[in-house]
Image (spheres, rainbow, N blue to C red):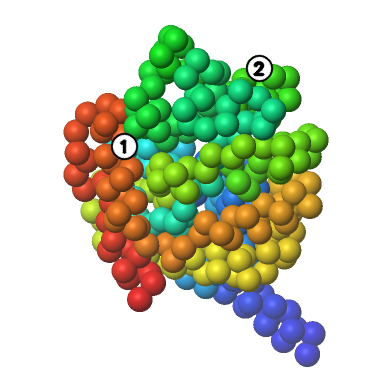
Amino acid sequence: MKKMMMALMAGAVSLMAAQALAADKVTLQLKWVAQGQFGGYFVAKDKGFYEEEGLDVTIKPGGPDIAPEQVIAGGGADVIVAWMGGALVAREKGVPLVNIAQPYQKSGLQLICPKDGPVKTEADFKGRTLGVWFFGNEYPFFAWMTKLGLSTDGGPDGVTVLKQSFDVQPLVQKQADCISVMTYNEYWQAIDAGFKPEDLTVFNYTELGNDLLEDGLYASEEKLKDPTFKETMVKFVRASMKGWHYALENPDEAAEIVMDNGGQDENHQKRMMGEVAKLIGTGKLDMATYDRTVKALMDQKIISKMPENAYTTEITDAALK
C-alpha cells in the first residue's frame, strides 16, 4: 500500500510538472508598483484563472524608472499596461504597439487645487504653476491646455509646468497652485495629508471631456502575426477580465491579494479598489474615446500622423464572446 501511495504521489507530481511545462508563459509589465490599480491581474493569477487557460503568467511591477513601452521593446514583456498617449508615441517612434484590450473605460485623472488658492475655474490657470507627471502621463494635460489655448512655456499667457513627483508634496509645500492626482490614489493621499474634500477644487478629466485612454493592454504587432501568440493573448485577456470582474465583486479580498503581491497599506488598497471599480468596463475599446484620444494627441502635435493598425478588436471579440 505504501508503495502504491508513493507511486500515485509520484504520478501526480509528474502530471503537475508536465502541465507546468505545457503552460504558455506570458510576462505582463505593469505601469506602476503593485497596487489596486492592477488588482484584476493579481486576482486572475491568485485565483487560478490564468492557469485554467493554460497560462503561466509572470507579473512584473513598474516604478518611476520603468517605462513599459521600453520594456516590451527590449523583449522583457509579452504584454504591457500603458496609457494610450505613451503607446501611440512609442508606436510612432518605431515600437509597434497594438491595443488588444481596454479594461479601463474611464480616466481616473484629475487636477486638484486648494479652494483658498487662486484657481477657481479653468479661466484662472493663466499665469499659474500646475503640477504634471511625465513619463507618458503628461499628454492628457498638454492636450487640455491646447484645447484651452494656453501655452505651457511659463510665459504670461500660459502656465508654468512643474514636473511633479508621484505624491502630493508639491501641494502640501505650496510649490504648485494645482497638482495632478488619480481618483483612486493621490487624491486620497491629499485627504490623508489633511485636505478635506470641501477644501479642494477638482477638475475631473472625464467630466470635462478631456479624458484620454488609460491602462490599456498592449502587445507587439509583429508577435500578433503569429496565430499561436494571438490565441495566447485571447486566453490572457479572457482570464484577466475574469480577474477584474471577481475583483470588483470582492474588493476587500482583491485588496488582500494585492497586499500579498507587494501592495502597501491595506486600507489604502481597499479604498483604491473601490475607486477603480468606477473606471473598469468590459475590456472592449470604445471607439469614440479612441478617436478623441488620437485627435487630442494630433492637435497637440504629440503624434504627427493618424496611427494605422494601432488597435485590434479581434482579441476581445474572441475573448469576451
165 sits to left or right of 320: right
Q: Position of residue 60 (x, y in %)?
A: 56, 44
Residue 162 seen in this snapshot:
no
- Packing grade of label 2 (10 A; few <14, some 14-19, many >=20) is some
User: Around disc 1, counting alpha carbons within 10 Å, would you say few (fewer than 14), some (14 to 19), or many (20 or more)?
Assistant: many
Residue 8 showing in the rendered view: yes
Residue that appears at 41% across and 14% down: 157
Residue 313, labelled with which disc?
none
Provide residue 59's location: percent of width, then percent of height. 56, 50
Residue at image point 34% right, 32% down: 147
Q: Position of residue 203 (x, y in %)?
A: 54, 39
**For the point 31% across and 69% down, which residue is it?**
317
Q: Residue furthest top?
A: 155
- The answer to which image quadrant residue 285 occupies is bottom left
Residue at point 74% right, 84% down? Answer: 5
In the figure, residue 195 lies in which quadrant?
top right
Q: Quadrant of residue 230?
A: bottom left
Q: Amino acid at mark 2?
A: Gln
Q: Upstream in the sequence, badge 2 or badge 1?
A: 2
Q: Is residue 216 left or right of residue 183?
A: left
Q: Secondary structure at mark 2?
A: loop
Callout 1 amino acid: Ala
Q: Is residue 47 above or below residue 9?
A: above
The location of residue 194, given as percent across then percent down, is 80, 35
Q: Are marks 2 and 1 in contact (CB under 8 Å)?
A: no
Check disc 1 and report its element: helix, strand or loop.
Answer: helix
* Image quarter of the C terminus: bottom left
Residue situated in front as seen by the camera: 48 or 285: 285
Residue in the foreground of this view, choosing between 129 and 16: 129
Q: Is residue 230 left or right of residue 155?
A: left
**Residue assigned mark 2:** 175
Q: Which mark is residue 296?
A: 1
